[in-house]
Image: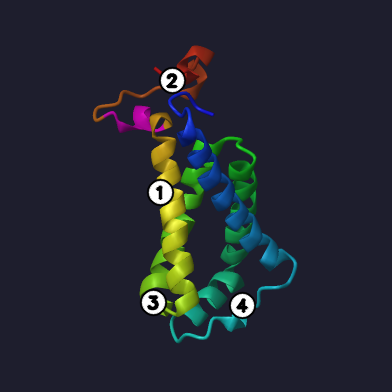
Amino acid sequence: MPDGSSGAMKYVILWFRLLFGAHLIYSALRHYLGFEVLSRVDHPIGGPFVRILAEMGIYELVKFTELVTGLLIFFGRLVPLALIAEFPITIVIFILNTFIVAQPRQLYSGPQELFLNTILIVFYGRYYMPLLRFNAPPRPIWTARWSDTKLP
């Protein structure tokens, strides 16, 4: 666990991390094992949107990203990177499920995914603090040292 998470809080963070990772893995495996059928999205906007994503190959990329980020988050590897990589997908799912399709199952899953991803980004927030420099000078990767990776 990252420093700063001690006592009961480390178990709360662990629970959220395992829940979100398992959710992403389950979502991806449903697709890859054939339990998810794209035509089931019976909505005049949501259905064509998902089908077009599939036709362009983007849906496969989304499911692959869900699987990889889910595994990373679940097993506690590169979690800050995985959370940020998953966040754009989370936003699209939230908007599609909450405001466009808005059926009971989607009204649960869209906000749930946004909540889990956001709360975990907050829990791992110190890793993102260096990104919040207003006037950041360039720091090319080829000039990096291992000491640059340490948290302040």
- Residue 79 occupies which quadrant of the picture? top right
Q: Residues within 10 Å of mark 1 (few under 14, many from 20)?
A: some
In this figure, which residue is indicated by the disc labeled 1?
Answer: 118
Q: In the displayed structure, would residue 2 be above or below residue 98?
A: above
Does 134 appear in magenta? Answer: no
The kind of residue on which mark 2 rests is Leu
Query: Where does the C terminus fall, quadrant-wise?
Result: top left
In this figure, which residue is indicated by the disc labeled 3?
Answer: 100
Residue 108 located left or right of residue 53: left
Compute the Cα span from label 1 to label 2: 21 Å
Q: Which residue occupies the extreme left position in the image?
A: 134
Residue for point 68% across, 66% down: 30
- Nearest the eye: 83 or 111: 111
- Nearest the eye: 16 or 100: 16
Mark closer to the chain start, 4 or 2: 4
Whole-percent x, y for residue 135 in the image:
24, 27
In this figure, which residue is indicated by the disc labeled 2?
Answer: 151
Compute the Cα span from label 4 to label 3: 16 Å
Q: Residues within 10 Å of mark 3 (few under 14, many from 20)?
A: some
Compute the Cα span from label 3 to label 2: 41 Å
What are the residue bounds of the magenta stretch? 128-133
The kind of residue on which mark 3 rests is Ile
Residue for point 59% across, 82% down: 40
Q: In the displayed structure, would residue 28 be above or below residue 149?
A: below
Mark closer to the chain start, 3 or 1: 3
Query: Where does the N terminus fall, quadrant-wise?
Result: top right
Whole-percent x, y for residue 66 in the image:
59, 55
Residue for point 45% across, 69% down: 108
> Which mark is nearer the camera, 4 or 2?
2
In this figure, which residue is indicated by the disc labeled 4?
Answer: 38
Q: In the displayed structure, would residue 123 be above or below residue 149?
A: below
Instruction: Identify the main secondary structure in magenta.
Output: helix
